[in-house]
């Protein structure tokens, strides 16, 4: 899993049911001090994260589908937690 | 998932049924501002995307096979949506 | 598998049962001489590792779920061993 | 999937049945203009590709095993097509 | 699959049965001419490889578990062959 910081929303026309009523968030990947690495992921929100939140991103299809309760979803990355502290 | 911009078609002789009547698109991977990263993926189109479109690319085999309704396909990357806006 | 060095804890609000009573550790990925590579992973501890320990990190969802005895967990990386020696 | 250019053969003693009577090809990964990226993959040939051919490489274990008709193979990358044109 | 050169052993206390009586080898990843790339993998030996051997490394969990005959192993990378020649 990696740390990300939510930097925006992605609005896309997708017909896969796994995305129904789900928010797609743009997450800048950050290092352990919170600095941007220059890379990003687009992840499905599962925790109500918003812009500026530091989040835990799981980038793995089978786990992502299980979190979303959707065996057949076209998904790979999900936000699984809001990070309170790294120490 | 990542953002891509469709930059061309790939014409290839492939005997796997998952590719029958499917278009293989060359997608430049772009950052959140739409700038090319220098990397690319070849993805199966599922949304009717064309050159210049910004798309959402899923690069994961099991999810890709599920989108294509093909349990046994030799596929890893699919275009799952056309991106209308990133903000 | 990769070598990591435990550098901290991640405190996060996560609702997935795979994380109940589990510690999430920040692991700096290191090279074979123990030097930091600049990359990191957040991994679930399974061996009682602590700060400064050199550990063996498995970064693969299906294997991670099996180690944790949890078929449906939102997890990809686990610490599977403490490294005593690399020679 | 990625574009590769076949640059050689790999001769190896492997005891896994998935490799019986299969050719292992060294594929330089190339960009969309055909220039070498400096990276490579070793892939099982399924299409009769030879040195200099531009090929479509699938680097994903489950898909590779399905192409090879071998549920239990120790394989991750296969050549799934010869590329006729990228435009 | 990638080419590696065995450069050492990893001694680790691991409780997962997939590692019982198995040797964990440190493999420097090399390019097609045998030059080190600076990256490495820790892989389970399945062929009796030793220091200095050029080997074929499979870095994929499901395939690795199948090679090891262990459906539930905490493993991702295995050495599947000793490379005799790349030409």
Image: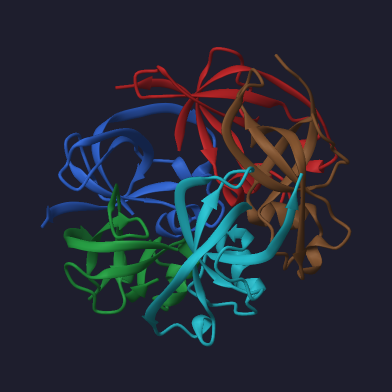
Chain colours: A green, B blue, C cyan, D red, E brown
On the image, which quarter does residue E8 sit in? top right
Residue C13 at x, y = what percent? 36, 82
Residue A10 at x, y = what percent? 18, 59
Q: Can residue B82 be seen in the rendering of this structure?
A: yes
In the rendered view, tell whether residue E53 sits above or below residue E8.
Answer: above
**At 42% from the left edge and 54% from the top edge, which residue is drawn?**
B68
**At 43% from the left edge and 68% from the top edge, which residue is drawn?**
A64
Left or right relative to B74: residue A45: left
Observer-nearest of E63 and A49? A49
**At 35% from the left edge and 24% from the top edge, which residue is drawn?**
D32
Observer-nearest of E69 and D47? E69
User: How many numbered circles are shown?
Assistant: 0
Which residue is situated farthest in the front direction here? C52
Q: Can residue A15 be seen in the rendering of this structure?
A: no
Left or right relative to D46: residue B28: left
In the rendered view, tell whether residue A13 sits above or below residue B22.
Answer: below
Left or right relative to E17: residue B26: left
Observer-nearest of D8 and D78? D8
Residue B63 at x, y = what percent? 44, 59
Residue B1 at x, y = what percent? 34, 54
Question: Where does the C terminus of chain C fall, quadrant-wise?
Answer: top right
């Amino acid at each position: 899993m990696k740390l990300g910081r939510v930097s925006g929303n992605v609005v896309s026309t997708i017909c896969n049911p796994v995305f129904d009523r789900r928010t797609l968030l743009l997450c800048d990947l950050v290092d352990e001090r919170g600095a941007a690495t220059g890379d990003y992921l687009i992840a499905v929100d599962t925790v109500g994260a918003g812009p500026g939140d530091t989040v835990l991103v799981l980038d793995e299809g089978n786990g992502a589908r299980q979190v979303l309760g959707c065996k057949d979803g076209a998904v790979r990355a999900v936000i699984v937690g809001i990070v309170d502290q790294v120490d």
